[in-house]
Amino acid sequence: MEGLEPEPAAAAALFGDGVDRARAFAAALAEHGEERGLIGPQELPRLWTRHILNSAIAAPLFPADGTVGDVGSGAGLPGLVLAIARPDVRWVLIEPMERRVAWLEEQVAALGLTNVEVLRARAKDAGRYEGVLDAVTARAVSALRKLIPWVAPLARDGGELILLKGMGAPGEIEAAQKAIRKYKLSEVRVEVLGEGVLTEETRVVRAVVRG
């Protein structure tokens, strides 16, 4: 598609056997993402590096055979990307907006993903998953101090938050100390992923939830 960033060399290594699905997802997002309000008009030239690989680089962090929630899945970043990269993990994509849920369901079907459930709900209303998920992730949803009260209750005791953030991640942790204490998070830290692999590194805030 005209204007779409060429597939970076790192894609094949990050997705392995799932690279064809990743390509299909990238093509669908490039073709329909703007018209359906999923991505902005300036995103095509950086769709792979800024969005798809930025999400995929975190795939090894999630527990094998676990169940992971992605809060505010939107266009499927990171949830659909991670589901492609980690077929051994069960993914629950939690998204309140009907038009985005429709997109996610279409892509799950089109890509033949059997390890994904799409749940139309706000995180606080995802009742049957409260306190049961092995890990919870989110990307570009909200500042950490607001995000923690949404995501932490979904994790089981000893489960993990794996939240994709930007350059300001350390400052967000400082601003979220009250929420960190309230929701009994431990081992809170920032990890930088993709150094030497991606042109733009990914920052992840990780924390363990203690019930």
Image: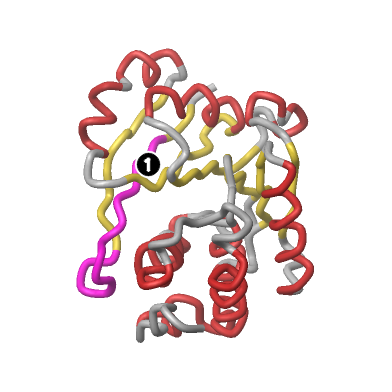
Q: Position of residue 159 (x, y in %)?
A: 53, 37
Q: Dot 1, how many residues are within 10 Å of its Cα: few (below 14), some (14-19), or many (20+)? A: many
Q: Position of residue 84 (x, y in %)?
A: 60, 70
| 199 is within the stretch colored magenta | yes
Magenta segment range? Answer: 194-207
Q: Position of residue 24 (x, y in %)?
A: 61, 79
**Closer to us: 69 or 120:** 120
Q: Seen in the image, is 137 located left or right of residue 196?
A: right
The quarter of the image holding the C terminus is top right
Q: Which residue is pictured at 31% across the width and 57% down the height?
A: 202
Position above or below: 1 against 95: below
Q: Seen in the image, is 55 located left or right of residue 110?
A: left
**Closer to us: 186 or 47:** 47
Query: Where on the picture, by quarter, is residue 8?
Result: bottom left
Is the image coloured rainbow, by chain, by secondary structure, or in one colour?
secondary structure
Query: Where on the picture, by quarter, is residue 38?
Result: bottom right
Q: Which residue is pictured at 66% across the width and 42% down the height?
A: 94
| 10 is within the stretch colored magenta | no
Q: How many marks?
A: 1
Q: Position of residue 43 (x, y in %)?
A: 41, 63
**Closer to us: 171 or 5:** 5
In the rendered image, is residue 60 in sight? no
Q: Which residue is pictured at 22% across the width and 36% down the height?
A: 170
Q: Seen in the image, is 58 located left or right of residue 21?
A: left
Q: Which residue is pictured at 50% across the width and 22% down the height?
A: 149
Query: Where on the picture, by quarter, is residue 33?
Result: bottom right
Kindly identify the amino acid type of the residue bearing the numbered disc 1: Arg
**Secondary structure category for the residue under label 1:** strand
Question: Label 1 belongs to which residue?
Answer: 206
In the rendered image, is residue 75 in sight? yes
Position above or below: 60 against 151: below
Position above or below: 209 against 12: above
